[in-house]
Image: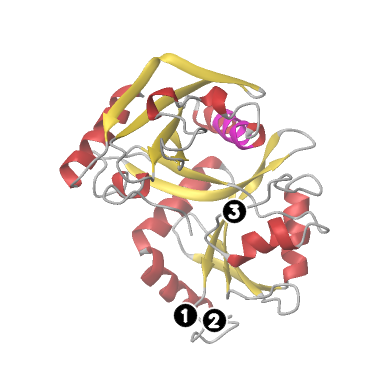
Amino acid sequence: MPRKHQYSGTPDDWFSDSLLPNNFSGISFDFFVNWSTYQLSDEIWIKRIVDNKYYWPQLNRSTLEHDLYKCDTKAYVGTLGAFADRSKVKLNYQFFKESDDWNSQPQSFISASIDKQGKISSVTHKSLTTIKNEIQTLSGGPVSVGSKGLTYSSTTLECYLANGDKASKAAWPGDVDLLILDKNLTPVAILEYKKNTIPPRYSNNIPITDEQLSNYYPKPDQRKYDRLAILRDFLNHQFQRDIPIFNLYFPTWKGSTYMKIEHIIGDVKNLRSNPENVSLRPLPTNKKEMQKITYSLITMI
């Protein structure tokens, strides 16, 4: 599992809806880029792991919808559905049980389409093979995560697709860590969370003050950031506005005290930092200090 700071947690904690300023909310989802055209595909996914005790596969739409609302809340699913409708993309939840060995014991999937009211409009039972084929179709062909593989992940499925099933080249799509929306569900900012995991006692430590896009772009993370820029350009066109991308650098090692917010500008394949829009802030120790970070970012938009 991903590392966390000893007392500050992660940006997921700082930018929760309860701490964002009034009239703002946040969503996250997995999205596809067709790498043959460098265009955003018209489908976004959200993965949810099904408890091993749960009856499966569950094909009853009302039962699945009821339990989805218990997991994600009806309000959140409604926000996602309305946003997808406004963005003219399809929203699908992918439900599955985890496997200790996806190669020899693959699990099946239930794919649930969500309408603009946040209700499940259709339910489809799919195999792992079907999911891998859909990933390749939406990605414009075979897709992998690169030679370094995947070290941390929220599911064994993603690790399997990235590391244990390289022959299929059907890596699960990357996500947007947070997309901040205003009261009209219009996107106002894209956030990417970047961990600083190496403490100062090691020679390859990068001080938080020195964290910047050029440390990772174009190598080794060009595809990750170009993905976000492609999402930004798509949303800019759909909503007729200029939506900024921000990197949030945060340390996970003991004794660290600062985090950094960096504005990313430029075109796909030519991204860069904006030196005039950077904020260095103390790591939060309580909810009030977390809220100060959210307000600091909102003022940078």
Determine if the magenta segment contains residue 228: yes
- From the image, give the main secondary structure of the stretch colored magenta: helix
N-terminal of the two: label 2 or label 3?
2
* Label 2: how many Cα within 10 Å (few below 14, some 14–19, many 20+): few
Residue denoted by label 2 = 60
Are the residues tagged 1 and 2 within 8 Å (C-beta)? yes
Q: Position of residue 248 (x, y in %)?
A: 41, 34
Asked if residue 222 lies left or right of residue 4, the reply is right
Q: Position of residue 233 (x, y in %)?
A: 58, 28
Segment tinted magenta in the rendering: 224-233
Nearest the viewer among 142 and 211 is 211
Are the residues tagged 3 and 1 within 8 Å (C-beta)? no
Disc 1 residue type (three-letter): Thr
Q: Position of residue 190 (x, y in %)?
A: 46, 35
Asked if residue 123 lies left or right of residue 4, the reply is right
Disc 3 residue type (three-letter): Thr
Nearest the viewer among 288 and 108 is 288
Q: Find the distance from the CA under tag 3 to the CA under tag 1.
A: 35 Å
Disc 2 residue type (three-letter): Asn
Q: Which mark is residue 151?
A: 3
Asked if residue 69 lies left or right of residue 156, the reply is left
Q: Which mark is residue 63?
A: 1
Asked if residue 59 lies left or right of residue 198, the reply is right
Q: Is residue 230 visible?
A: yes
Q: In the picture, which quadrant includes the C terminus? A: top left
Please name the residue shown 76% across and 62% down the image: 165
